Structure formats: structure tokens, C-alpha cells
Amino acid sequence: MRDTTTATGGIPAQPGPSKAESTPDDGEHLPGAGAQESDPSGVIAGAGPVARPGERATVRLRDGGEEEPSRYAPEWLQLREGADAAARAQDLLDPLRIRLADLPGRAGGIAVHDLGCGTGSMGRWLAPRLDGAQHWILHDRDPYLLHFAAVASARSAGDGSRVTVETRRGDVARLTPDALSGASLVTASALLDVLTREEIEALADACTGAGCPALLTLSVAGRVELTPAHPLDAEVAEAFNAHQRRTGLLGPDAVTVACEAFSERGATVRVHPSPWRLGPAESALTEQWLRGWVGAAVEQRPGLRDRAERYLDERLAACAAGELRVVVHHSDLLALPRPTGTAS
């Protein structure tokens, strides 16, 4: 894991983003991408090319302005994958399986759109937990992450059926009206809390319009428990939550807004807690999470800096000694819209 402290030992603003590195503009510059593009079918088991020039994307980039840099480095996403897998709500899988089993044309397999896929951890977790042939469409704005996701994707479903993958580059915040045509399921992980109200409503419109279930996991809930407690815990948490809500983003309010948006459109919505539970065995993840958590708080409230740096030093020392335990609360949401009979 890359050290996310700055050269002067300060606190970074976010856990794991690769601010110092530029990402390639397209898949041609990625290791191994050329071999993928030689496949005329465009889809192979467990991998796939980035979108070719001129190909219609199903996810539109945000309008106006230059494209933003990637939010997260692959090292951070890989570091958190085990905690994410342990946290995701298994209780939501049975109602999802029931809905998918009732889809028209299910014998031909299901089409899953993974929005903001990152390195593809959602597909590696979910594909083996579902039966039947699956075709995953991985969406992300970062071609480097899409390459990671494609080459490390699941190859088979829970019953051994084939899983195929393709990648599409774009910002998931703006769905085109036909983005989910033919989709059987939409998934996302740690996405809702970095969207605005309008973007969540657009997502709910797209899913309910297509009659497509949505499994949206690991949205921040705005609550953190650290043991042993510290007098500054609550103040840092409050500043971090305010940072999550900056510039119109929903942060800890995202799940509530999503529940309302899907429910208002006739979907049945279930929410289940999905907390990270971090102890001595997860010390590397805890360290990087702490740096990003405190760093975001200081970015939001610069007056905290001196106290926060001492606080971070104490917390990191406790983490290194195996004395710190952290519960980071998240929520998983399953929305089951009224079927339209068009999903395949």
C-alpha cells in the first residue's frame, strides 16, 4: 500500500487517491490492452476490452468542464476488498435471487451493470453467489481501474456457469435514458454517498423505468466507533461527515434519499447494515482509513489541524500496537422495482 502521507508528514485529504499519478486516456496505453482488442467478438470469458473509439457509451460523462481525476488508487481499493466482502449484507441476496429467478428469458443468462466498478471487487464477490450464466458490464471513468477489473473478474457463477465481462468508460453520475435497456441487475459499491440528490433520482428513474433491481452496497452511514474512545472522536466524525456533504454530495444522507427515490417510484426497498469491523488483523486498512478520515476532517475544518495531528499520531500508535478497534458503519440497499417484462 502506498504511503498516503505528504512529503512534509501532513494529513492527506482522502484515503488512497493517486493524486500524483496521471491515468492514460484510453485502453491502448494499458498493459495487455492490445491483446484484448484483437478479439473480434469484443467479449471473452472473464475479461473484455475498453470501449472502442466511436462506440456508444451507456453512461454519459458529466457535462461541461474537464474530466476529473480518479478518486481512488487501485492499492486502496485492493486493501479494502476483504473488509468490503466481509461487510456486505448477505441477507439481501435471497430476495435478489428470487427476483432474478423470475426474470423472463432467464435461461439465457442475466446482464449485470456494475456502476463505478473500481477494480471489480463487487463482481468478484457477487458473481459466485448467483447461479446461471452472467454477463457483467463494468462502468468506470478510469481506464486503468477498468483494466484491473476486467483481468481479475470472476470466470464462473455459483453453479459453474460462464461469466463474461465487458468494460465501458464513463461517469456513472449521468445515466442516459436507455442506459439500462436489457439489464437484469444494477450493482454498485461505495457509490451512493458520492452522488447528489439529482443523480440518485436519475439512477432510480433508470432502474425503475427498466424494471431492474439495484443492489447498492457499502454507503457511508455517518457513524464510526473507535475503541478505546478518545475525546476528539466525535469532533473528527462531525467534520468528516460535513466533508462528505460538500458541494451538494449526499454523504451519510445518501441511503435515506435513495430509499425515498426508489419508494416514490414504486419499488420495494430493503436496507441492511454492512459495517466494517476492523481489529489487529486489519491494521494496514485501519491505518490508511484513519489517515483519510482525519485528513478529510481537517480539510473541512482547518482549525482542527494541530489537535488532529496529535490525535492521528495517538491513534496510529494504538493501531500499530494492536490496541485499536474500529467499526465503520455502512448500509446496503436492495431496490426491487415493479417488473416490466423487458429485462433479459
Image (tube, rainbow, N blue to C red):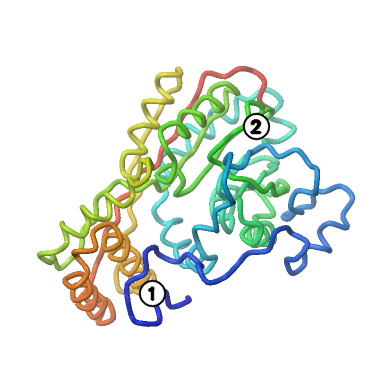
Report the front residue among 27 and 307: 307
Q: Nearer the viewer, residue 173 or 112?
A: 173
The residue at 82%/63% (across/down) is: 34
| Residue 61 in the figure: left or right of residue 30 | left
Vertical side of 283 occupied by 262: above or below: above
Q: Residues within 10 Å of mark 1 (few under 14, many from 20)?
A: some
Q: Residue at x 34, y 72 (%)?
A: 287
Chain-order first, disc 2 or disc 1: 2
Frontmost residue, 307 versus 96: 307
Depicted 277 relative to depicted 261: above or below: below
Q: CA distance from mark 2 to mark 1?
A: 38 Å
Q: Dot 2, how many residues are within 10 Å of its Cα: few (below 14), some (14-19), or many (20+)?
A: some
Residue 113 placement (x, y as % from top left) = 62, 40
- Tag 1, which secondary structure? helix
Q: Residue at x 49, y 38 (%)?
A: 215
Please state if 75 lies on the left or on the right of 231 as rendered: right
In the figure, 38 relative to 42: above or below? Answer: below
What residue is at 70 percent from the left and 48 percent from the top? 163
Instruction: Residue lying at the far front in this picture: please name it.
Output: 65
Near-viewer residue (82 or 101): 82
Q: What label does residue 173 carry, if any?
A: none
Nearer to us of marks 2 and 1 is 2
Which residue of the protein is positioned furthest toward the left in this rendering? Answer: 231
Where the C terminus falls, by quadrant?
A: top right
What's under tag 1, amino acid-wise? Answer: Ala
- Residue 38 rendering spot, x and y as whole percentages: 88, 58
Location of mark 2 (residue): 179
For badge 2, the amino acid type reads Ala
Question: Residue 128 appears at what percent x and percent y?
Answer: 59, 50
Residue topped by disc 1: 284
Label 2 sits on a secondary structure element that is loop
